[in-house]
Image (spheres, rainbow, N blue to C red):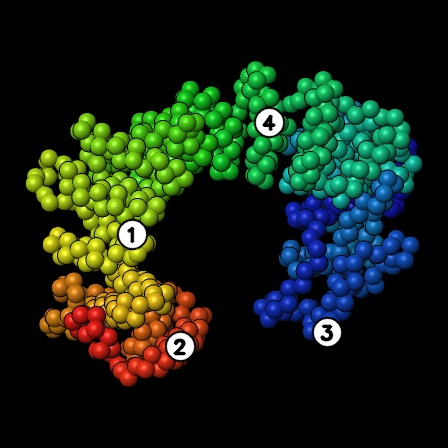
Amino acid sequence: MPMLGPEKVSSFKLQLARDELEMPMPPTKLAIDPLWQCLCPSWTQAAIPRARRVAAQSTRPIPRCVKRPPPPHAQQRHLSTQIHSHSHAYAAPTTESTAGPKFTYVKHAVSQRGEAVHRREHALGLHRNAKGDNGQDLRKEPTPYLYSRLRALAIGGKVRECRVIAELLIKERKEKPNVQLYNALIHSNVSHDEGAAWRVSEYLEEMREAGLQPDTGTCHVVLKVLSVHPDHLLRTDTLEYMKARWFQLNEDGAHEVAAGLLREGLFEQGLEKLDAMRREGVRLHGWLQDMAVYMLSAAGEVEEAYRIMRLRYDGGEIGLSRTVWYTLLDAGSSYRHHPSTSLIWNSQVNAGYLNPSTGICLNVLTTAAQAGDAVLATDVFSHLSKRGTAFQPIHYQLLLECYLSTTPPDLKRALSILTIMTLEKLDISLAETRALYLHLRSQPALVAEAFATLRELHEQGRKIPIAALNLIIECYVQQRNLAEAMKVYKLIHTFVPMAEGAKKTFANIETFNLLLRGCRLASPPDEGLASFLVSELLALRIKPTVLTYDRLILVFVEAASHALKAASTTTEPTQAQAQRAKSLQLSDWAFRHFIDMQAVSASARDHSHDHPSNDVLGLQQKATLGWMPRFGTVERLATQLAKVGDRRCWDVLQAGEDQGGGVDGWEAKGKWVRRNVEEAWERAAKADHARGGEAFGGRLMGQEAEAAGVST
């Protein structure tokens, strides 16, 4: 029988040498460091530039017609280094190509001298590997058994063992290369560790040069390998080859094509292939659909993954993988996909097949909140309760949002969540009431209903948190209905739980901050009510915050600005003078609150004793250094002082510039504040000069203040 040609034998030998070293042929790498040069004296400095040139040339694909073999001495050095040192620092140029339907590739040239060295090593390797896994001597087995053994090893992806048997059949049994032999060699590359698409291209090229035409079995094993080692061009060439020769793609081949498309990330083409198979009545294998769900979930294509699982679930498929369900639940809840989350929770979690983690449960709860699925949210709470989870405010917040997202929204249940949080001794912050605030702000008529619901819950023995009452006040303040907000404030003491004994009220600093904001938003700004709230704050011994000072300053600045506008619009000189004096006095009080704020900061500088300040709130405090109003408050205070001709506007401006690092936005917009203050000062000077004023630039305009009957 004719033997394999010299070129084919060389290719087999070169591949066996690679396998004997138990390492793949990587791209060219040069290990050039002092330790390597010391351990390998033959690797001289003179050889390094030459090796670099060879490596630079080998990394580029060279057309077969112009490729020349390297010099014999270079090939000998390469092979000797590769075989004896077993190091990763060797130059082994490889090229991978799938150029067109002819399955062409670029083969490695081996010199005659290097081939002799390789032949000796190959003979030793063949002798060592001529035994099977069970120690039997393959050379003693008959040829039909070797073919059967070759096919079995190919199915298992045993690349090296298949090469050994193929070499044995050709060299010793004088078998002629045939399609059956190449099919097994190609099939052996299904191994994800040792297989490779470029090796399939080599086998196909060898078949072409040997005059062997790939049959339908060859094409299908190629597609099977490409489902593990994707190569889009080679797959396209194979399918075109099959189409040209009227080869039918069987069910397994169709599955392999779809798997390869999904593995390459071509999800649209892969899903079209699955749909086409389903329309043609092909029974889709579970492993392919599982793989599609895994890959689509990982890529964030939850809708398509859900569609696949929904079809399988509705079709009554038995034995669906719980891991697949779990993966889809994780992805679906992460992307807030309600249909998939609801399906898996109702069919798998409630049935006891899955026990999702706490993080997934929180995602499911968030998904239910966005979709308004109160039943699903309640199921999540029940599941977490059985597990003994300690509920956090975020859990109740999501449940509250869920009740507000239902159709119609259940306001009473949402408010009752706040009472449950109080019962569980959880602190309720603004974050937990934002959903309720947005809901009531969009429907102002519901604010009174919400307050009535709180009174009803209180009569039922529920403990009403102050955050719920502050929510009602905030809604009225947002509507600029200060009167109703004050009514709620005056009724807060009626919500004090009986267990806490007699109390005047249980309002907190947030309550007063909201009411001060209402004083500023009122028309006109109500500085008198603000003063009353300050006295209430003192009586209840509630410590003010930075926001308290900030809003108190704004109340008096807005009131002063309103009085100044009234003075410019009135036609009676006496009223105009009185309004200007009032504006001047209110501006003075705004500045005093600013000084009080600075005094609170200054008190922290001296830890030896407390310095009493002229704080209008009458409080002696230790606070963090750098208490400053917000950027807008500083700007409006300085500008207002400039408008009434109070030279203390420059003090405020200087304080802002000195502590600009503690005021958000000052570094970017501070220069515009100075410009606005200077312009306001010039306009005020011109207006005062036109009126014949003589006290401009003083702390107070005494004549106008006396005319208005205002004591300074």
Query: Is 580 on the left or on the right of 232, as rendered?
Result: left
Label 4 Cα crowd, 10 Å radius (few <14 / some 14-19 / many 20+): some
Q: CA distance from mark 2 to mark 3?
A: 85 Å
Sort mark 1 into few (<14), some (14-19) or many (20+) by Cα contacts within 10 Å.
many
Q: Is residue 710 left or right of residue 355?
A: left
Residue furthest top in the image:
316
Which callout, 3 or 4, points at the residue further toward the start of the chain? 3
Q: Quadrant of the N terminus?
A: top right
The residue that label 4 is drawn on is 307
- The span from disc 3 to disc 4 (Cα, nearest Å) is 64 Å
Please tell me whether residue 29 is drawn above or below residue 11 in the rendered image.
below
Q: Which mark lies nearer to you, 2 or 3?
A: 2
* Residue under label 2: 683
Residue 143 visible here: no
Q: Position of residue 601 (x, y in %)?
A: 22, 69
Residue under the point 20% across and 49% down: 508
Residue pointed to by mark 3:
46
| Dot 3 alpha-carbon crowd within 10 angstroms: few under 14, some 14 to 19, many 20 or more | few
Q: Secondary structure at mark 2?
A: helix
Rendered image: mark on residue 518 = 1
Q: How far is mark 2 from mark 4, CA to CA?
A: 70 Å
Q: Secondary structure at mark 4?
A: helix
Q: CA distance from mark 1 to mark 4?
A: 52 Å
